[in-house]
Image: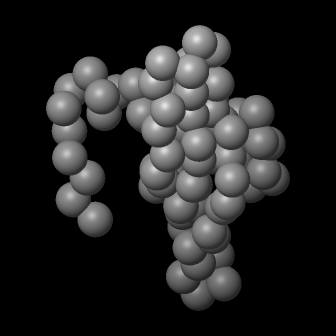
Amino acid sequence: MKIEVTNINVRREGGEVVGLQVYFNGRLGDQSINLNGYIPLAEGEFESHLDMPAIETAVRQKVVDRILSGESPTE
């Protein structure tokens, strides 16, 4: 699945980055599945510098985990 990050909202508390809200578009190579949404990343799930490939990998894994578990976000 190809995941493309389209927007990142940074959550801060007391001037410190405590999380990211990562918006994305995703699709299979044959275009049979298209999806979009956002995945929250908490402190510790991203480096202090933004490494886009690492963020896209983390989003891809969370999307797969949610699809496979049937988990519904609670935020």
Horizontal side, residue 67 vs residue 11: left or right: left
Say which residue appears at 59% left-offset and 47% top-offset. Answer: 24
In the rendered image, the residue lying farthest to the bottom is 14
- Residue 5 point in image, percent of width and height: 68, 46
Quarter holding the C terminus is: bottom left
Image-quadrant location for residue 16: bottom right
- Residue 19 point in image, percent of width and height: 54, 63
Horizontal side, residue 71 vs residue 52: left or right: left
- Residue 1 point in image, percent of width and height: 57, 19
* 66 or 47, nearer to the observer: 66
Say which residue appears at 40% left-offset and 25% top-offset. Answer: 64
Q: Look at the picture and state if 11 lies above or below 25.
A: below
* 24 or 22, nearer to the observer: 24
Image-quadrant location for residue 12: bottom right
Image-quadrant location for residue 18: bottom right
In this picture the colour scheme is: one colour
Q: Look at the picture and state if 14 lies above or below 52.
A: below
Say which residue appears at 56% left-offset and 27% top-offset. Answer: 27
Say which residue appears at 49% left-offset and 32% top-offset. Answer: 34
Q: Look at the picture and state if 37 lies above or below 53.
A: below
- Residue 4 can be seen in this image: yes
Horizontal side, residue 73 vs residue 35: left or right: left
